[in-house]
Image (cartoon, rainbow, N blue to C red):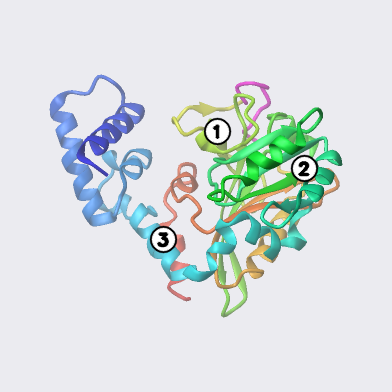
């Protein structure tokens, strides 16, 4: 990161979390204090402001999983050569075929006739770039009236891109009501102790779409809230990436706080089963969809599950992580 980008990022985050009218001496203090937080705790700029490090001292800061500590966990738990299973959507779909709950095709393999048949049999499909992340490279397409030849040619002509096409999935109505324009997923973060065959549930969140976007990702304006692991009840306000807080969904008005996730115990067991299915990648954030009949669909597995949003609701998780991975 260049100095200019660093400065702009620092000021952007400072004003978002502290306010606009900050005396110059305070700005200098925060900057120097951040450098200490970076050196001692490995905090990123986002960590420093989002976790309130500017109001905490050593003991308070030491409770948080920071950017540097997060990478230590990832390096210790996730074998590098197996991370492709999570990062390449085609490889992921093949490895987790029993968990998908949806039909799909790979355009590196499927010919035009297969592509044409797939589109004509599905009213809505999602086109995904296999290496896309945070909702980037995902396109929702209504297939009626589409020129299939032109679409196929445009998707395969650039060999730098690799696309898969998936059928649209449905979600349970209790979660759909929050934001009907997107699939609203459950994010469950697990640590798998493959020596003792024990899956630890670290954190759980609901992810809700916003602004009528077709994805619920926070980087597209989505909203997240904490789920109590034991009860399945949302026990915090919702937050977006700009630190706005919501008791009710801003578009639909559905109350977020206090909502109980349906089929919660079964959802936890589903995440544990998925974790055991990839024993060499032990730290994963699972994105799960609940269907009306109580079955589940696995959207993706994130071997680099964001450490920041896990801790905005329930405080620092570093002691919890350390107590588990020290026994690995």
Percent from the top left, x then y, of residue 94? 70, 62
Residues at badges 2 and 1 in contact (C-beta under 8 Å)? no
Q: Residue furthest bottom?
A: 195
Magenta stretch mostly in which secondary structure? loop
Q: Which mark is residue 36?
A: none
Query: For the residues marked 2 and 1, what is the alpha-carbon distance in whole angstroms?
Result: 27 Å
- Pick whichever of labels 2 and 1 is earlier in the sequence: 2
Report if residue 254 lies within the magenta region: yes
Percent from the top left, x then y, of residue 158? 57, 45
Q: Which residue is mark 3?
A: 319
Give 15 or 56, whichever is nearer the viewer. Answer: 15
Disc 1 is placed on an element classified as loop
Quadrant in which the N terminus is drawn: top left
Query: For the residues marked 2 and 3, what is the alpha-carbon distance in whole angstroms?
Result: 38 Å
User: How many tags in the picture?
Assistant: 3
**Residue 57 sits above or below residue 247 on the image:** below
Q: Which residue is mark 1?
A: 237
Q: Which residue is mark 2?
A: 169
Report if residue 272 lies within the magenta region: no
Magenta part of the protein: which range?
249-258
Q: Name the residue at 55% across, 33% down.
A: 237
Q: Is residue 301 left or right of residue 49?
A: right
């Amino acid at each position: 990161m260049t100095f200019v980008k660093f400065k702009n990022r620092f000021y952007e985050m400072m004003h978002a979390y502290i306010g606009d009218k900050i005396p110059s001496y305070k700005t200098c203090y925060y900057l120097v204090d951040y450098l200490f937080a970076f050196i001692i705790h490995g905090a990123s700029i986002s960590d420093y402001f989002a976790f309130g490090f500017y109001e905490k001292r050593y003991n308070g800061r030491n409770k948080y999983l920071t950017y540097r500590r997060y990478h230590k966990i990832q390096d210790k738990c996730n074998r590098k050569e197996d991370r492709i299973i999570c990062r390449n959507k085609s490889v992921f779909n093949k490895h987790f075929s029993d968990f998908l709950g949806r039909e799909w095709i790979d355009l590196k393999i499927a010919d035009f006739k297969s592509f044409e048949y797939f589109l004509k049999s599905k009213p809505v499909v999602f086109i995904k770039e296999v290496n896309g992340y945070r909702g980037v490279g995902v396109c929702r397409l209504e297939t009626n009236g589409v020129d299939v030849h032109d679409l196929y040619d445009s998707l395969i002509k650039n060999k730098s891109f690799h696309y898969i096409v998936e059928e649209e999935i449905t979600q349970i109505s209790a979660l759909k009501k929050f934001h009907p324009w997107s699939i609203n997923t459950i994010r469950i973060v697990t640590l798998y102790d493959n020596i003792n065959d024990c899956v630890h549930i670290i954190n759980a969140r609901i992810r809700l779409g916003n602004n009528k976007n077709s994805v619920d990702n926070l980087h597209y304006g989505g909203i997240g809230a904490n789920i109590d692991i034991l009860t399945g009840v949302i026990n915090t306000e919702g937050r977006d990436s700009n630190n706005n807080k919501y008791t009710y969904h801003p578009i639909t008005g559905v109350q977020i706080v206090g909502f109980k996730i349906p089929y919660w115990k079964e959802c936890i067991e589903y995440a544990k089963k998925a974790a055991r299915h990839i024993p060499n990648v032990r730290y994963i954030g699972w994105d799960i969809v609940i269907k009306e009949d109580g079955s589940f669909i696995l959207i993706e597995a994130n071997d680099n599950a964001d450490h920041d949003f896990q801790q905005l609701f329930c405080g620092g998780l570093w002691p919890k992580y350390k107590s588990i991975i020290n026994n690995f």
